[in-house]
Image (spheres, rainbow, N blue to C red):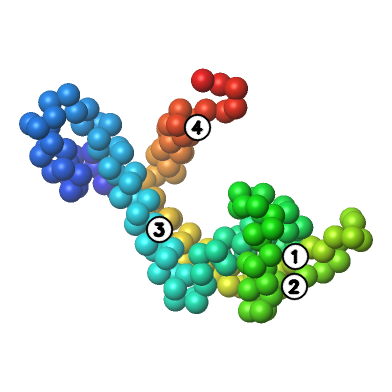
Amino acid sequence: MGRVTDRDPVDQHVARWLPVLPDLDPDVEGAVVRMSLLTRHLRAVKDRALAELDLQEKEYGTLHALAGRGGRAAPSEIAGDLRMAPASITARVDALVRRGFVRRIPSEVDRRRIDVELTDAGRTAWQRAMRVVGDEEHRVLGALTPDERRVLSDLLRRVTVAAHPPAGRI
């Protein structure tokens, strides 16, 4: 496990800017730059995994939304999860149907509605991408103990709530 005394390139970045910006808070700058670097790293791993699996980001996102709903959902539910207009989900579903990753089936709750369901191939493609990304997340966060990961998650929750306060809260 790394120690607090371990240095990284962000320490050099902060040291370079402190003389230029004397009011710079090194802890804020260090945290923000490190979060950005980690996000970029995980994004690059995900992009490589998707490219190797011949999945487009929008295909993966749609498969992910479906998997999160138990493998079956109405197009409007998928669109809501992806924060898209319901009409714009049709092209995504069409492309996934052509690839054999999903199929359209009659709704079990409303016979006027058609649902979208993951096929075995779609679930496998989604799981393979998730495994690559998840393995890297565990590798990177494996630098911390389980207790440290919990503390980090709690601290990031507080920061996220500050950045995105719940509705009605200022």
Q: How far apart are marks 3 and 4 (CA)?
A: 21 Å
**Residue 170 vs residue 67: left or right?**
left
Quarter assignment of residue 105: bottom right
Mark 2 packing: few (<14 Cα in 10 Å), some, or many (20+)? some
Q: Residue 153, percent across and down?
A: 46, 38
Q: Distance between the residues labelled 1 and 3?
A: 27 Å
- Which residue is the site of mark 4? 164
Q: Nearer the viewer, mark 2 or mark 3?
A: 2
In percent of the image, x 55 and y 64: which residue is there? 58
Residue in the foreground of this view, choosing between 110 and 128:
110
- Which residue is the site of mark 1? 116
**Residue 44 vs residue 100: left or right?**
left
Q: Residue 157, percent across and down?
A: 48, 34
Among numbered discs 1 and 3, the one appearing first in the sequence? 3
Q: Are marks 1 and 2 in contact (CB under 8 Å)?
A: yes
Placement of 72 over or under 147, stated as above or below? below
